[in-house]
Amino acid sequence: MSWPLAALGDIAPAKPIKLNGYTPSDRIWHVTLDQIESNTGLLLEKSIKPLSEAGSSTHAFDDRHVLYSKLRPYLNKVLLPDETGLGTTELVPMLPATGKLDRVYLAHYLKSKTFVSWISSQTAGAKMPRVSMNTFWEHEIPLPPLVEQKRIAAILDKADSLRRKNHQAIQLADQFLRAVFLELFGDPVTNPKGWELKPLKELTSKIGSGSTPRGGQSAYVEEGISLIRSLNIHDDKFLHKNLAFITDKQAAALSNVEVEKRDVLLNITGASVCRCSIVDDSILPARVNQHVCIIRAPELVPEYLLHMLISASYKRYLLNVAGSAGATREALTKDQVENLMIPVPPMILQEKFAAIKNMVKSVINKEKKGIYLPLFDSLSQKAFAGEL
């Protein structure tokens, strides 16, 4: 069944509320992009601050609105607020027309794989591509009767609940690993177990970063040798998305930063400084650019070194080191990385942690391959095609 179509600008225009009765000292909910989780629309944290510190009131909203991110790669960030607040300028406060459009139905549509794929192709801009709002408001969405919208929204809510539980299980596994690390090794900064401390350079056979081939992105090729960049490195997670490729000739010029199996990779500059992961061996052969540092440590188990570097206390320490020079951009120098003091517990204990992590990761991988995400995407696609 095909439903009639309606333009977003006609049925869910940007209509911020007026904050009548508020004074500058009144505290109010303030929403930024970072506080909204992609895909799920879950609120990661809630920031309450005085109105005078919360920004422009032109983006004020209440519990009737849908907040939509117009920036790529955050086009799947959609929030259903439950109270009055202020959003940053990247968030559009959409107000569904009463009696015509259910806001939960709208939120599911804006997060649907089909819509996100389409709107991603409509973005423009170099550093932070954003949606052309004229194009956005002209986009037509399926508009079944309100009672049918609510039925569809209820079905998708149930499927989304399963997806969220799956996601939460993965988060709990990560928390478990962090707890096991602290139990086995203690805090790596205060070192309560008294492990021997050594500078990283004494434990490694390789510490170094590479460079970007002349020409930057225009020099990349469709297939070839992988070039690992900072956007591929997240804490305990290697992302294949946006992995770049270079030619054999370009790779030869970076032969001194050839990545090997089980190398630990650390971001050393920019907004992602201090993020760290173990390389995914499936993308080898590979090189790194100037923002990523290879740490090859034969004297340490990679899983131990990784979790030490991303532990809460050591991450705070690293960030302080990265900002110590007072530069406008945070960075870790090679000398600073080489002289990081590393607790060195017995190898058998490090291997025990690695074995535990591998078992947990096996469970996580099974969760990621579960039916919930494909099920939700399938239901969503059918719902907005009038087939649910």
Image (cartoon, helix red, strand yellow):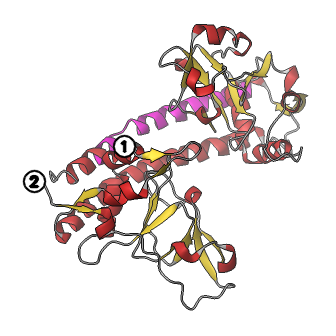
Residue for point 73% across, 47% down? 312
Image position, residue 235 (x, y; %): 64, 39
Considering the whole magenta stretch, tell me its main secondary structure: helix
* Label whose residue precedes the other's in the sequence (1 or 2): 2
Query: Which residue of the protein is positioned furthest toward the front in this rendering?
Result: 134
Residue 318 disc label: none
**Residue 107: percent from the left, percent from the top?**
36, 61
Residue 117's disc is 1
Q: Secondary structure at mark 2?
A: loop
In this rendering, would 135 be left or right of 332?
Answer: left
Taking the magenta stretch, the answer to whether it contains residue 370 is yes
Q: Is residue 237 visible?
A: no
Q: Residues within 10 Å of mark 2 (few under 14, many from 20)?
A: few
- As drawn, the residue found furthest toward the bottom would be 21
Query: What is the magenta range?
Result: 348-376
- Between 291 and 214, the residue placed more toward the observer is 214
Disc 1 marks which amino acid?
A: Ser
Q: How many angstroms separate mark 1 from mark 2 (CA)?
A: 23 Å
Task: Give the residue at x 71% y 24%.
Answer: 301
Q: Quadrant of residue 184?
A: top right
Q: Is residue 18 above or below residue 292?
A: below
Q: What residue is drawn where x is 65% and y is 33%?
A: 230
Residue 197 location in percent, x, y? Answer: 89, 31
Q: Nearer the viewer, residue 114 or 259?
A: 114
Pointer 2 residue: 1
Q: Tell me which residue sits at (75%, 34%) in the image.
A: 268
* Closer to the eye: label 1 or 2: 1
Q: Is residue 385 above or below residue 231?
A: below
Image coordinates of residue 388 in percent, x first then y, are: 16, 53
Amino acid under disc 2:
Met
Q: How many marks?
A: 2
Looking at the image, residue 147 sits to the left or right of residue 29; the answer is: left
